[in-house]
Amino acid sequence: MAKVLIVDDESVNLELMEALLSQDGFQVFKASNGELAVSAAQEVRPDVILMDIVMPKMSGVEACRKIKTSPLTYAIPIVIITALNTQEEKVKAIRAGADDFIGKPFDAVELSARLKTLVRAKAVHDRLEASLASLREMQRLREELLKKTATDVEQPLRVISECLQLVAAEQHVLSTRVQQQIEPALFCVDMVNSMVADFAGIMSMEQEKLMQAYESLNAQRVQPLPPETPPQQT
C-alpha cells in the first residue's frame, strides 16, 4: 500500500484529502505545518507528499527545501497543492524541489492519477537504489574473499618456493630427473603468484569504478538547491 503524507494547516482540508485518498487505497499520514512535515517525512518515508504552501511555523516551500536536501528523503516526490497560482510562487516551489503542482480547488480524479504516476516513479527509483546497494555489498564481499584468498595462497606458495630453492642448492646429490623438475616447479610458483596479483589488480579497478558511481549518486542525493532570488524590479 502506497503511503501519502498530507501537509495542510486546515483540518478540514486534511480530513477531505484523507477520505478521498483512503478510498483510492492509499495509506494516509497527516501533518499540520512544515516543521511536522519534515519530521514525518523522516519517520514515515512516504511514497509521495502533498504540500500546502501557506502554513504557520514553516512554509510549504521551506519544508519542501529541507526534505529535498536530506539524503534520507530527497527522492520523495512532492506535489504542491495551493490556491496561490502566481508564477512567482511556482518558481519558488520549483527551486525548492517540488515535483508537481495542483491548484485549489482540485479535481479528485486528477489528483489520484497524478499521485499514482509519482508513486510508480518512486517505486522504480527505490528498486534501482536497492539493486545498487545489493551490488555494492556483493562487491564488498568479493573483495574480502579475494584478500583472504591471496593471503591464504601466499604463505603456502612461499613455503613451497623456499623448499624448492633449498632443493635446487643441493642439485649435485639429486638425480637428473629430479633436477629437471626443479626449474619448472619454481616457474609454476611464480606464475600462480602473478595470477593472484593480476586478479587482485582487476578487482581493485572494478571496486574503484563502483565507488565512483556511488559517489556520483550520493552527490546527486544531497546536491544543494539553488538559492531563491528576488524578482527583478521593473
Image (cartoon, grey):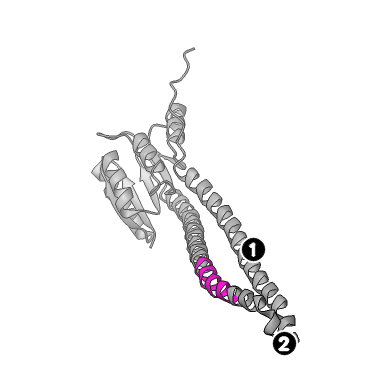
Question: Which amino acid type is shown beneath numbered disc 2?
Answer: Ser
Rate crowding at label 1 as few (under 14), some (14 to 19) or many (20 or more) other CA atoms within 10 Å.
few
Quarter of the image with the N terminus is bottom left
Asked if 183 appears above or below 47 in the picture, the reply is below
Residue under label 1, please give it: 198
Is 22 left, or right, of 153 in this rendering?
left
Q: Provide the residue span drawn in magenta.
A: 146-160
Residue 108: x and y, percent? 40, 50
* Residue 13 visible at all: no
Q: Please, what is the dominant secondary structure of the magenta stretch?
A: helix
* Residue 131 visible at all: yes
Callout 2: SS: loop
Between 218 and 166, the one lying in front of the other is 166
- Identify the residue shown where x is 69% and y is 80%: 171
- Identify the residue shown where x is 51% and y is 48%: 215
- Identify the residue shown where x is 36% and y is 58%: 26
Label 1 to label 2: alpha-carbon separation: 36 Å
Rate crowding at label 2 as few (under 14), some (14 to 19) or many (20 or more) other CA atoms within 10 Å.
few
